[in-house]
Image: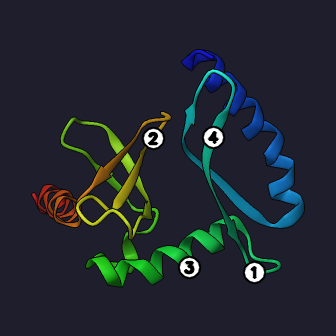
């Protein structure tokens, strides 16, 4: 099996699991896959939300709980920052398993995302504040 074939099959699987997510109030994320001639082994994670909790509420709660561990601020959730390449991004998530670059920033109007260190985010926010003070 070729890489393109495996990627197409994983994309189809993700599409079908969207209805499962809605029905069971969970969030399924894929983080790559291994494949051979006859098998595909996707790495996926299922996050179970409390009953009645929206995805946005769940994400914010997760963010606030983890930010203390890595030295981030609770106010950073959904904050827009200007990156050093001129793009604008929104701070969406903190991955506690990524010690060096735990902050996930989603680029606005794009599928791109960047992993940043807490120090980088603090720098971008301080530069933004300095620009506003001028």
For label 4, count other residues whose C-alpha is less than 10 Å away and answer few (under 14), some (14-19) or many (20+). Answer: few
Where does label 4 land, which residue? 41
SS for callout 2: loop
Furthest residue in direction right, as rendered: 23
Secondary-structure class at tag 4: strand
Residue occupying the point 48% across, 33% down: 110
* Relative to 56, 89 lies left or right: left
CA–CA distance between discs 1 and 4?
28 Å
Question: Compared to 71, does 87 lie above or below?
Answer: above
Which residue is label 3 attached to? Answer: 61
- The residues bearing labels 2 and 3 have C-alpha atoms spaced at a distance of 22 Å
The x, y position of residue 1, in whole percent, is 63, 17
Left or right placement of residue 67 versus residue 25 in this view:
left
Q: Mark 1 points at which residue?
A: 50
The image's mark for residue 108 is 2
Query: Where in the figure is residue 90, as x and y percent of width and height?
Result: 42, 53
Q: In what element is the residue under mark 1? A: loop
Number of residues whose C-alpha sits closer than 10 Å to that of mark 3, classed few (under 14), some (14–19) or many (20 or more): few
Among numbered discs 2 and 3, the one appearing first in the sequence: 3
**Disc 1 versus disc 3: distance between alpha carbons?**
11 Å
Real-space CA distance between mark 3 and mark 4, rounded to the nearest whole angstrom: 30 Å
| Image position of 132 (left or right of 50) | left
> Foreground residue, 64 or 102?
102
Q: Quadrant of residue 113?
A: top left
Q: Residue at 68% across / 31% down in the picture?
A: 39
């Amino acid at each position: 099996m070729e890489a393109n074939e495996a990627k197409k099959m994983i994309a189809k699987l993700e599409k079908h699991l969207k209805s499962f997510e809605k029905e069971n109030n969970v969030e399924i994320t894929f983080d790559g896959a291994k494949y051979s001639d006859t098998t595909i082994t996707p790495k996926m994670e299922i996050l179970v939300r409390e009953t009645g909790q929206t995805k946005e509420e769940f994400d914010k709660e997760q963010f606030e709980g983890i930010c203390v561990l890595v030295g981030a601020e609770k106010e950073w959730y959904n904050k827009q920052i200007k990156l050093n390449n001129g793009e604008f991004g929104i701070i969406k998530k903190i991955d506690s398993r990524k010690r060096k670059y735990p902050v996930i920033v989603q680029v606005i109007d794009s599928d791109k995302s960047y992993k940043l260190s807490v120090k980088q985010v603090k720098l971008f926010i301080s530069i933004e504040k300095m620009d506003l003070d001028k």
